[in-house]
Image: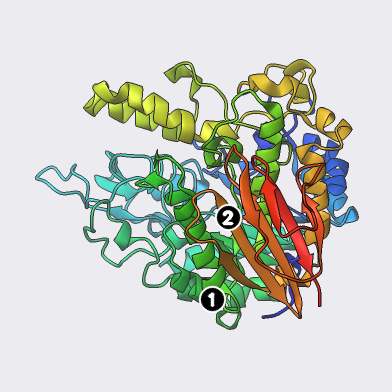
Amino acid sequence: MREQWFKDAFIYQIYPRSFKDSNGDGIGDIRGIIEKLDYLKDLGITAVWLSPCYKSPNDDNGYDISDYRDIMDEFGTLADWKEMVAGMHERGIKLIMDLVVNHSSDEHKWFVESKKSKDNPYRDYYFWKKGRGKDGKKPPNNWMSRFGGTAWSYDEATGEHYLHLFTKKQPDLNWDNPKVREEVGGIVKYWLDLGVDGFRCDVITYISKVPGLPNGKLAGDNMFTHGPNIHAYLHELYTEVLSKYDCMTVGEAAGVTVEQAILYTGEEREELSTVFQFEHVDANSFLQIVPRKVDLKRTKKVFSKWQNGLHGKGWNSLYLENHDQPRSVSRYITDNPGTDDFLRKQSAKMLATAIYFQQGTPYVYQGQEIGMTNIVFNSEADHVDVLSKTVFALVKKYAPFLKGYAMKALAIRSRDNARTPMQWNAGKNAGFSDGEPWYRVNENFAYINTEESKNDPDSVLNFYKKLIAIRKNSEIVRNGSYKELFEESKDLYVYLREDGGKKLLIINNFKNKEIPFTIPESGERSLILGNYKDVDGEKEMNIILKPYESRVYLFEQ
């Protein structure tokens, strides 16, 4: 395995709309990010993943792009962006942009041209197909949109349907057309030449569809996920463009298996640097959407599967939160500490320890480092995300008696939970904006904010700083073997990392109760990280773990 910068990076995801507003319009922007670059440097961050900031009508909050080479007006200008990336590089922070090229916006010039006629030069940039039925208005196949309903929309002007695996304003690009692949390569080169250091590749495993677009199983997923030409297309992008730069890629790979991840990330294959897999998220939900109670045994089994499966063969991505997932303290802590802020902090620190001492590149989502939580939804109107709105519309149409259940499920799972404004201080709008925020601020900002965290030596924020400093350039964390201990425990997640005669023992109590524990390794040890100030029995073999306690011991020969 080659030594590459992203293997030692600690990456911070910024959702620009909700990060920091600099001009009082209630919408986060690039100049707001510039204001907070020193905060990121102080935290120890070495790279930023910036969610889409390109021009967009915002049907899906920027994941519907109308111009891949310019910046959304609400976020600023290209000059602002250039100032931002220069400021990042001055502070030793690399920039990873979102690459959204499975689909574009229907307002992109390519699609505007594509709709004009069947013989338009841009027609084949997208998937157009005759419908079924006498009038041709029935969808061409059984493929379903990720947001519900058919994945096809009918165009009266040309009498054909176009494919959109997401909203109808996000038509899928036809990667089978060499011109489309050339266009994508040009976009990638454009941003790399401007100083970008890598890309998070949105739903990249959907870019190759089965020729002829036949019916598939259930919602048709098997016809467009990990399609027949996916590896050829990724290898082509790598050889033609990416290989010429010192950059990294991480592919969003829903449904990927360990075996498939090795194909995508094996260094000799020259495709992607790493992937985001969702198995630990899906382990605690039905159909990837409906939440069920988190089961620690089930969750850590997935962690261990990926740690052992990719070791020496590919590269992991480590995350608990992002713009599509709820807040981890609210999701993974099943013995809810309620209003006990001390236990919220301890559980947030414990979760960080559990995930970030595994092998792989760590990602932290804005606000995770201060222990931000899910919000409280009082009505359907509190939801603004397109996916939540779609769920409510489907329930209203087909099963209105399930609205109460939908409210409960979305309270846990809704993407809105992660998209509330960043909580900077206890002042107006949590310091996010002087104006009316585009989305409501979580009501707990008065005591969960970065200003409070900076001043508290035992805060989640200061714990993250310690963890990041320990993890940086740690050969055991980067290269060491992984072994889970106490696999049958429903309360504890314990694992051992070992490299070059050194061992790290990572202990995590997932319960809101004390648990007796015997240290399973003998020899001289030192406690290098813990989330309690007063550690009981630090040098003893038999200890009592406090609620949500975590400890990291170093054993040296």
Q: Please tell me whether residue 58 is drawn above or below residue 132 in the rendered image.
A: above
Residue 112 lies in what quarter of the image? top left
Q: In this view, does 284 lie above or below 121?
A: above
Q: Would you identify the image quadrant in which residue 65 lies?
A: top right
Amino acid bearing label 1: His
Question: Residue 405's x, y, as percent?
Answer: 34, 26
Tell me, yes or no, whether the two marked residues, 2 and 1, touch with CB atoms within 8 Å: no
Find disc 1 in the rendering and name its residue.
235
Q: Which of 278 and 464 is in front in this view?
A: 464
**Residue located farthest toward the left when viewing the structure as drawn:** 134
Residue 398, horizontal then vertical, whole percent: 22, 28
The mark lying in front, picked from 2 and 1, is: 2
In which quadrant is the N terminus drawn?
A: bottom right
Look at the numbered disc 2 and give the secondary structure of its residue.
strand
The alpha-carbon separation of the residues under discs 2 and 1 comes to 38 Å
Horizontal and vertical percent for residue 510?
Answer: 58, 45
Query: Viewer-proximal residue, 402 or 140?
Result: 402
Looking at the picture, does residue 530 appear above or below residue 477? above
Crowding at dot 1, Cα within 10 Å, few <14 / some 14-19 / many 20+, comes out as some
Determine which residue is flagged by label 2: 493
Q: Disc 2 marks which amino acid?
A: Tyr
Residue 193 percent across, percent down from the top left: 75, 63
- Number of labelled discs? 2
Residue at x-position 53% and y-position 54%: 202
On-image quarter of the C terminus: bottom right
The residue drawn where x is 35% and y is 60% is 224
